């Protein structure tokens, strides 16, 4: 299977105080860290959707979402539309830019697990990343709206989901607020 990585990183980070993608955490920009984690986990190509902040991201293909203010759903649509043009890619692992506790070991478990919809689980709670087989992309893209991204799609297909526990090697906590210095 050829698996790509897709990092959703277009938001303005209202509660955070600015876009999260370029934020340096533990000496590394969040966007660079996300790309490294996906690459080390076996994703053959990594795509990053940017919007509120746009800049270079080494080792990734940058996609711009002009509709980023409408929410994460439009970023997922931009990513999937681009991936549709890459017939060699059979599945995609989608993650968010603001998950500093995500590890390549956790992503690798998701990548290696069979299933059309594979969701990382932290102590039985669904989280990121999520792997989607190509066959799901058209419906997934249609259902992506506002700030919910894939949430509605995943809920509608809850019987088909493969949950993969990764809480022993990662945390699913996001950075909603800037760490105090």
Image (cartoon, rainbow, N blue to C red):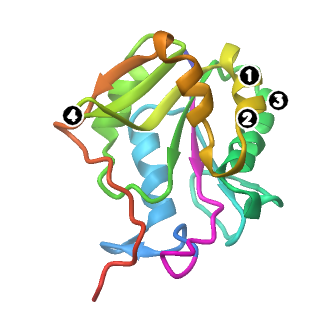
Badge 2 or badge 4: first in the primary sequence: 2
Tell me whether circle 4 and circle 3 mark residues in contact (CB < 8 Å): no
Q: Does residue 63 lie above or below 43 as drawn?
A: below
Read off the residue under disc 3.
85
Q: Quadrant of the image for the N terminus?
A: top right
Q: Residue furthest bottom?
A: 181
Q: CA distance from mark 2 to mark 4?
A: 29 Å
Query: Magenta segment, which residues?
Result: 4-18
Q: Main secondary structure of the magenta part?
A: loop
Magenta stretch containing residue 50, yes or no?
Answer: no
Q: Residue at x 52, y 70 (%)?
A: 20
Which residue position holds label 4? 123
Q: Which mark is residue 114?
A: none
| Residue linked to disc 2 | 80
Q: Secondary structure at mark 1?
A: helix
Sort mark 4 into few (<14), some (14-19) or many (20+) by Cα contacts within 10 Å: few
Q: Residue at x 39, y 55 (%)?
A: 99
Quote the CA–CA distance across marks 4 and 3.
36 Å
Mark 3 residue element: loop
- Locate residue 145 relative to residue 2 in the image: left or right: right
Depth check, mark 3 against mark 2: the one in front is 2
Give the labeled residue for mark 1: 139
Q: Is residue 3 above or below residue 5?
A: above
Q: Give the CA distance from mark 4 to mark 1.
A: 28 Å
Tag in front: 2 or 4: 4
Whether tag 2 and tag 1 are in contact, CB under 8 A, the answer is: no
> Cα distance, mark 2 to mark 1?
11 Å
């Amino acid at each position: 299977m050829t698996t790509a990585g897709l990092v959703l990183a277009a938001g303005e980070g209202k509660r955070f105080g600015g876009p999260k993608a370029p934020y340096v955490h533990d000496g590394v920009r969040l966007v660079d860290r996300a790309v490294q984690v996906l690459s080390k986990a076996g994703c053959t190509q990594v795509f990053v959707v940017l919007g509120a902040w746009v800049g270079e991201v080494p080792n990734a293909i940058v996609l711009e979402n002009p509709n980023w203010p409408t929410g994460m759903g439009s970023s997922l649509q931009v990513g999937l539309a681009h991936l549709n043009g890459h017939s060699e890619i059979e599945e995609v692992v989608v993650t968010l830019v603001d998950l500093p506790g995500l590890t390549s070991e956790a992503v690798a478990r998701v990548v290696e697990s069979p299933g059309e919809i594979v969701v990382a689980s932290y102590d039985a709670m669904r989280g990121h990343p999520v792997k989607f087989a190509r066959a799901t992309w058209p419906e997934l893209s249609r259902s992506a709206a506002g700030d919910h991204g894939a949430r509605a799609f995943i809920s509608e297909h809850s019987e088909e989901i493969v949950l993969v526990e990764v809480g022993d090697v990662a945390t699913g906590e996001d950075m909603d607020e800037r760490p105090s210095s």
